[in-house]
Image: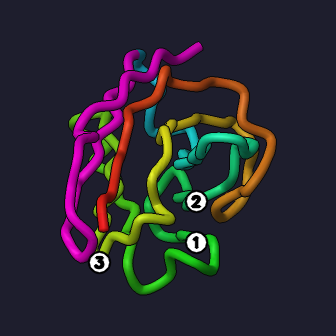
């Protein structure tokens, strides 16, 4: 089992940037694929980005391609989401997740979740 804690959320103007961090506990962090999801008011939880355990493969939801970058530092047990050119539509609670599902960068099958960090983008 892995425990996840997100940080880095906040209020930012449209066009600005934020970098979210997800700190993971446990000795087997490097064996987990990691993902970022978001949940906006009145909407369900939606996939944002994912990264394989090695960091060699990534996947992004279409609306964030070219703006967001997911990365990880296994030595620090941390996964990041760099968010640039933020839009009001990006406003949501962002959650990181971990899965032992083998593959490049899965969009589903996540079993472990953080509590989330609020990102608010004003226009």
Q: Disc 2 vs disc 1: Cβ atoms closer than 8 Å?
A: yes
Rendering colour mode: rainbow
Q: Is residue 91 above or below residue 109?
A: below
The residue at 38%/17% (across/down) is 25
Q: Nearer the viewer, residue 46 or 112?
A: 46
- Indicate the quadrant containing the N terminus: top left, top right, bottom left or bottom right: top right
Q: Earlier in the sequence, mark 2 or mark 3?
A: 2
Residue denoted by label 1: 60
Please state the horizontal and vertical placement of residue 24, each as a whole percent of the image.
38, 25
Q: Is residue 68 left or right of residue 35?
A: left
Q: Nearer the viewer, residue 28 or 33?
A: 33
Q: Secondary structure at mark 2?
A: strand
Residue 45 vertical position relative to residue 117 in the rendered view, above or below: below
Q: Mark 1 vs mark 3: which is more N-terminal?
A: 1
Residue that appears at 23% across and 39% down: 8
* Percent x, y of residue 89: 50, 65
Q: Which residues are magenta?
A: 1-25
Q: Residue furthest right?
A: 109
Badge 1 crowding class, 10 Å Cα cut-off, few under 14, some 14 to 19, many 20 or more, is many
Which residue, given by chain and number where applicable, does mark 3 sit on?
A: 85
Q: Where's residue 85, x and y in %?
A: 29, 78
């Amino acid at each position: 089992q892995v425990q996840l804690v997100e940080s880095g959320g906040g209020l930012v103007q449209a066009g600005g940037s934020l970098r979210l961090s997800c700190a993971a506990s446990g000795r087997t962090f490097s064996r987990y694929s990691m993902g970022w999801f978001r949940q906006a008011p009145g909407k369900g939880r939606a996939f944002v980005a994912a990264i394989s355990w090695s960091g060699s493969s990534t996947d992004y939801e279409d609306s964030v391609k070219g703006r967001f970058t997911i990365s990880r530092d296994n030595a620090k047990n941390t996964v990041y989401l760099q968010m640039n050119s933020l839009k009001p539509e990006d406003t949501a609670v962002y959650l990181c997740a971990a899965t032992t599902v083998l593959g490049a960068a899965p969009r589903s099958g996540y079993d472990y979740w953080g509590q989330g960090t609020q990102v608010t983008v004003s226009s």
